[in-house]
Image (tube, rainbow, N blue to C red):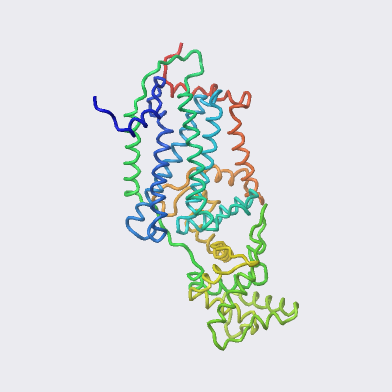
Amino acid sequence: MSKKHPLVEALNRSMIKDVPSYGNKFFYSLGFLTMIAFVMLIITGVIMSFYGPAWWLTGGVGKYMRSVHLWATQAFVLFMVLHLLIVFFTSGYKKPRRLTWMLGVLMLFVGLAETEFGYALRGDFSSQWRSLQGADFYNGGGIGNVINPLNYKQIYGIHVVVVPLVIIGLLALHYLLVRVLGIAKPYRKDVSVQTVPANHALLFGRGGALVVLILLLGLLLPSPYIKPTSIESVARQDPLLVSKTLVAEFDGSSDTATYLDNINPYTYDLRKIYIDQPYQQYLQTQAHQTDALMKFNAETPDIQKQQLKTASDYLAQDKPDAHRAPVSPVMTIVSSLTTMAQAGLYETAIAAANSNGVHADESTYSTRFLADTGVLEAKATALSITTDQYGMIREESGKAPGAWWLSPIGILNHTVLSGDDNGDRDAAIIFGSLLLTMLAFPFIPYLNQLPDKLKIYKLIWYQKYK
């Protein structure tokens, strides 16, 4: 008899050998299929990280890899949710499997957070809008100073390294417990089942079919792409809007300057980032330009305030008469920075800016500026992806599924949180409470008997009852 390859032998030893008679059904392959989807996410993610955003956004193979990554994400979340539901309906969380349930719940919530980090990195308009909404959610949850979805490099590290390692750790512990304890057998005395050998060939066949399906979906229904909005594009299309926003950053009346939430991480010096430092860079390119900022700073506070108000009032007109434009250092600075933005230099300048001596590396600065112009919300509204439109649960193009798992947030925003001025904070509290409830569910008297009352286990076990 020929010896099997050592890897095959090791794989066989790691697999569960005997299962209840229903253990070879599709319902009990869901955990394995979740793992297959996760492996595909790791493989495609590593390849995409190696070649970079330009490749996965513009290259033919790169765009396909991005599409496969999208569909692997869909499969990962779908099978994880279904797996958790099967365990719930069959009361597979009962002692001694309570820890197994808790690890699965943690994996679900960590996985859902990971999907949104991925959306923030995709490099299209969806990334801009979702990262902005995600930032509001984390700010409302009180951890905006720790996790900032607007900071591309931070989220890249979290998405590519930190969270995958956490999921791998949870997955390993989860499977180890399943391997030791085996598949949960019916807890009811009126249900008897036989123990049969696990059909590993069938299990891997289902896994292979999933891989093929994901690869085909990536080809037939590619991940959509809508070009991100830039300050340069806004300045070219509507220079007046950029000038208005610059004055609002200058006088501290912009949305970022007046941001209100449970936590406000946007405490950097807006005038320094959006006005002072970019203008100094502008002056370096102008040999004979008078320093209007120095002149403005030499004025009294009352005169400075009046100049800002005059500029704001003038720019607030629908069609300001250029011949009647106020002459002031403020208007000179704003006009110079608007020209800089049209040339594509302003966004680079604020990205290189630093506040309090610390470089923020920030896509935060440019995204917040764009948010202050209002163009991001206007574009999201036109694409029907704002929160008020049950957005975030569908893709912009409508040609591929979106984050359907965020539907509960959409429902909350149209019911419990409708008109709630502290919606982000309260949503974070609700989801935090949901996480704690799900973790503690096996230990909660009466409530943990709910699946037994629903009797959906009959459809899953499908056994003859006494």
Up-down relation of residue 225 to residue 351 (above or below): above
Q: Residue at x 41, y 48 (%)?
A: 70
> Residue 55 vs residue 260: left or right?
left
Q: Quadrant of residue 271?
A: bottom right
> Residue 87 vs residue 18: left or right?
right
Q: Residue at x 50, y 74 (%)?
A: 345
Tally of marks: 0
Up-down relation of residue 237 to residue 123 (above or below): below
Q: Nearer the viewer, residue 7 or 114?
A: 7
Q: Residue at x 58, y 46 (%)?
A: 414
Q: Nearer the viewer, residue 201 or 414?
A: 201
Quarter placement of the N terminus: top left
Where residue 206 appears, as percent x and y from the top left, is 34, 33
Q: Residue furthest left?
A: 1
Up-down relation of residue 454 to residue 338 (above or below): above
> Residue 277 vs residue 166: left or right?
right
> Residue 231 vs residue 272: left or right?
left
Where residue 51 appears, as percent x and y from the top left, is 38, 57
Q: Residue furthest bottom?
A: 288
Where residue 219 appears, as percent x and y from the top left, is 32, 49
Q: Residue at x 41, y 26 (%)?
A: 16
Whether residue 41 appears in this view of the structure is yes
Whether residue 419 appears in this view of the structure is no
Where residue 151 appears, as percent x and y from the top left, is 55, 58
